[in-house]
Amino acid sequence: MPQSSPSRSGPPRRRSPIRLGLGLLAVLLVTALFGELLLRAGIAAGVERLRRPDLYADPRGDDDFWLLQHRWKLKEAPTGGYVHPTLGWAPRKTADNPLGIIRPGSYTPDLDGDVILFVGDSFVASPGPVAHRLPQQLDALLPEYTVCNYGVGGYGVDQILLRFQDAHPPFRRR
């Protein structure tokens, strides 16, 4: 009589949970590596959606943000300002805002009258409505003075001094 192949008897063979876990870990690592390579390739290729430093670092207190800003040669700052050569970032000066200050609406600066300059960090710039900020409150209380809000969020003492030195010359009395 011909012999038949031996049949397995007993419970079906189970896969080892360790082998299954290692296989899953390998798939996750390969997927993460592939995703990282795609991300880096997109950044190197200049995909604008990926070349935003605020995706990778906090602009309010992380030096890596400014490192990426410089490395990618970007001109726009996160606050709608621009990258300034000595200050790091500053509000953009425009035809409507020739001094680059926080002020509602467009204006023409009065460089000959009495002026109070508020220079500082986010406490002066304030994230609230413009009319509720300290310099604007003082401007409403002292109509005989022009009050200029030169506050910029995230500035340190060194940047505040440099901002003052940059802002002060047009207001010197002749």
Image: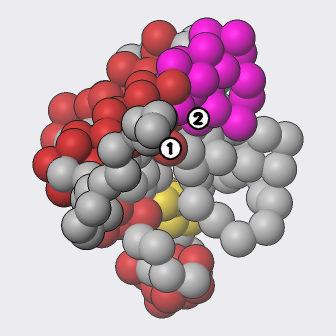
Q: Residue sitting at 78 percent across and 40 percent down?
A: 94
Amino acid tagged 2 = Arg
Amino acid tagged 1 = Leu
Give whichever of 155, 72 is nearer the camera.
Answer: 72
Relative to 38, residue 59 above or below:
below
Relative to 159, residue 154 above or below:
below
Give whichever of 30, 78 is nearer the camera.
Answer: 30
Place of residue 148 in the rendered image (x, y in percent of width and height, measured from the top left):
51, 59
**Residue 96: in magenta span:** no
* Residue under pointer 2: 52
> Residue 55 bears which disc, if any?
1
Give whichever of 95, 16 is nearer the camera.
Answer: 16
Relative to 135, residue 112 above or below:
above
Q: Can residue 80 be seen here?
A: yes
Place of residue 167 in the rendered image (x, y in percent of width and height, measured from the top left):
46, 36
Place of residue 62 in the rendered image (x, y in percent of width and height, measured from the top left):
27, 40
Q: Crowding near pointer 1: few (<14 within 10 Å), some, many (20+)?
A: few
The reply to whether the C-beta atoms of the residues labelled 1 and 2 are less than 8 Å apart is yes
Q: Which residues are magenta?
A: 35-52
Task: Calculate the distance from the C-alpha at mark 1 to the C-alpha at mark 2.
Answer: 6 Å
Q: Residue sitting at 79 percent across and 67 percent down?
A: 105
Dominant secondary structure of the magenta stretch?
A: helix
| Picture quadrant of residue 124 | bottom left
Q: Residue sitting at 82 percent across and 50 percent down?
A: 96
Q: Is residue 15 left or right of residue 58?
A: left
* SS label for mark 2: loop
Q: Crowding near pointer 2: few (<14 within 10 Å), some, many (20+)?
A: some
**Residue 44: in magenta span:** yes
